[in-house]
Amino acid sequence: MRRLTAALLPLAIGLVLETGCKSSRRHRAQVVEEESGELLSSFGMSNPKAAVQLVKGFHEAEGLWRWTQGKFSMALKSPKDAAAKGGVLTLQITAPEVTVSRLQSLDLACSIGGTALAPETFASPGEKYVKRDVPPAAFNADVLPVECSLSKFIKAGEIEIRELGVIITSVSLESK
């Protein structure tokens, strides 16, 4: 049964989404991860079990974190009781000095399950916990697409061959 679940997981995530620079700084992810073999609602970017949930716009893990591109998306398991109570999406993000110094500021806009969340502005480099309330109506499926885009990013070839946005360490979707 576990083999079947593992084989069908990428297909299920794809169907849900269809419908609906290296730093020496060490990041600490404080995320509670769920049982193995299931989709997660909270995980660190270095978790190999969660890699299938990173749908697009993420570069390879560099220690405990990953660079994003200008647009990135992931699939998260809907937490228990969130459809009734609502939830909170938390992203642990670093706006690197190289990005902010070149772009001055950048805005991060995210949506979850098709519901737009309030944007976040990064005007100075550093680490932030971006927390957004998610209304109960957004929890309309067992697996939710989280779509994010940056107003500005470093285009591929400007600094290195990759497109660079922000650094993300962890993501969490919890029930209120």
Image: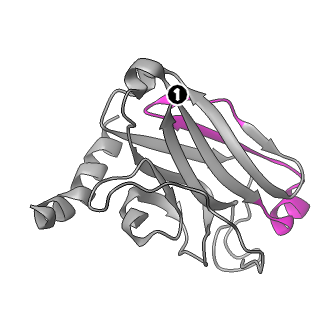
Q: Please determine whether, in this image, residue 15 is positioned above or below residue 62.
A: above
Residue drawn 81% across the image and 63% down it? 99
Residue drawn 71% across the image and 47% down it? 129
Residue drawn 37% across the image and 67% down it? 49
Q: In this view, does 53 lie to the left or right of 93?
A: left
Q: Name the residue under label 1.
A: 176
Residue 95 position in % (x across, y down): 78, 58
Q: In which quarter of the image is the N terminus?
A: bottom left
Compare residues 56 and 49 and report the one nearer the observer: 49
Q: Is residue 141 in sight in this rendering?
A: yes
Compare residues 98 and 61 and report the one nearer the observer: 61
Q: Please determine whether, in this image, residue 22 is positioned above or below residue 101.
A: below
Instruction: Indicate how the structure is coloured in the image.
Output: one colour
Residue drawn 80% across the image and 64% down it? 96
Region in magenta: 95-119
Q: In this view, does 56 lie to the left or right of 120?
A: left
Q: Please determine whether, in this image, residue 12 is positioned above or below residue 4.
A: above
Amino acid carrying mark 1 in the image: Lys
Q: Does the magenta stretch include residue 98?
A: yes
Q: Does the magenta stretch include residue 25?
A: no
Residue 27 position in % (x across, y down): 70, 68
Residue 60 position in % (x across, y down): 53, 75
- Quarter assignment of residue 117: top right
Residue 115 position in % (x across, y down): 50, 27
Q: In this view, does 12 lie to the left or right of 58?
A: left
- Counting every numbered tag in the picture gives 1
Q: Is residue 151 in sight in this rendering?
A: no
Judging from the image, what secondary structure is the residue with disc 1 in? loop
Q: Quick one: label 1, few (<14), some, or many (20+) residues within 10 Å?
A: some
- Quarter assignment of residue 66: bottom right
